[in-house]
Image (spheres, rainbow, N blue to C red):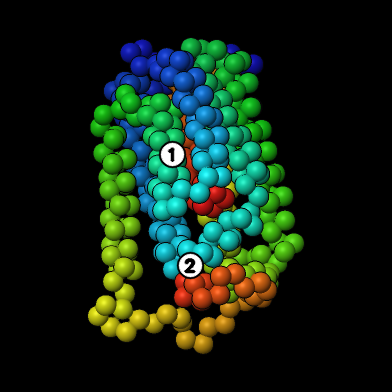
Amino acid sequence: MSGHFIIPKKYYQFTFIALLILTIFTVLISRVDLGVLNTPVAIGVATVKAGLVGAFFMGLRWERANLIFVFGAIAAMVLFFLFTFIDLAYRGAITDEVSQPYGYKSPVKVTEKLHHSSSEKMDRH
Amino acid sequence: MQQIQKRKLPHYFNNAHQEFEAAKLGMWAFMAQEILFFSGLFVAYGVFRYFNPEMFIYASRLLDWKLGFINTIFLIISSFTMVMSVYHIQHNNRTKSLVNLTATFFLAAVFLIIKTFEYKAKFDHGYYPGMLFSGEGAFSSLHIFFGLYFTITGLHALHIIVGMVLIAWLMVRVWNGTVSAEYFTPVEMVGLYWHFVDVVWIFLFPLLYLL
């Protein structure tokens, strides 16, 4: 295929090494309790890894028109999360909150109760 | 290895470059759909985690992060062997391309085998998906986590199986000479799909095993 751009091998090797390092990093950092930062750090590292795969393995670094699909899909995903979580955050603000489906029985055999008071509040169906 | 087959350009394309670009356009449209498909599952994860934050922390410790970690490494290596296969077919080195495709195929198989053992270990504790759940735990909402776990990783595993079939098909085509440096579109397109499957796992590993 004449005139087709071939991505140099060094980009693939760099991406591969970076992905391995970031994978080890994300496991190590998960052993440390960062409090509220636990989730943002883990998702941040995963996003960087996904970005590396996208940019170099999938060649988006050299892509133009097709980027519209990637950014379009990501934008739709952001909207999906946004509207769902706006709903969740303001449940019970206007009407009474229904915390549990009617007549529902959990199939879990509850054995050990951890952190009594707080888990009762959080542990909803 | 058989002789390289001369490919006849379909009459509805002006040239090989246009054909390649058309294939890539279609592939990216499909990938956008795949992102949306998995986003529904990620939103479900987010919603249930929002309602049961402590249960999710408890439940993720019931999974073996070491197996998840090994599987992550295998998938990353398989993504690398996949791009190397594309690279070698672009340089008309069909033998090396075939070797890399074979490696990708076996890494995918190892991923599924490890996943099977993981599922087996969960089933042994009664951690089945949905209404089949019969396990015990500290939270009465524990079945929600395993419902999500089996749905998301199951659909991901289904993507791996589809990828393995496609890679096997590519191995045949590289061997019989219907793809070469002159026409490598199928190898590159399956490569895109395979990296997408890798990206999904890159998010699933911390969300399910580490957080």
Residue B179 lies, with reference to residue B134, above or below; the image says: above
Confirm or deny contact between disc 2 and disc 1 (CB under 8 A).
Answer: no
Q: Amino acid at mark 2?
A: Asn
Q: Residue at x 71, y 61 (%)?
A: B123
Residue B47 lies, with reference to residue B20, above or below; the image says: below
Q: Secondary structure at mark 1?
A: helix
Q: 10 Å neighbourhood of mark 2: few (<14), some, or many (≥20)?
A: many
Q: Residue at x 55, y 34 (%)?
A: A24
Q: Amino acid at mark 1?
A: Val
Decide which of B3, B47 is in the foreground and name it.
B47
Q: Residue A87's spot in the image, x, y percent?
A: 30, 69
Q: Residue B190's spot in the image, x, y percent?
A: 49, 33
Q: Residue at x 35, y 16 (%)?
A: A5
Decide which of B3, A16 is in the foreground and name it.
A16
Q: Residue B164's spot in the image, x, y percent?
A: 60, 38
Whether residue B195 can be seen here: yes
Decide which of B52, B88 is in the foreground and name it.
B52
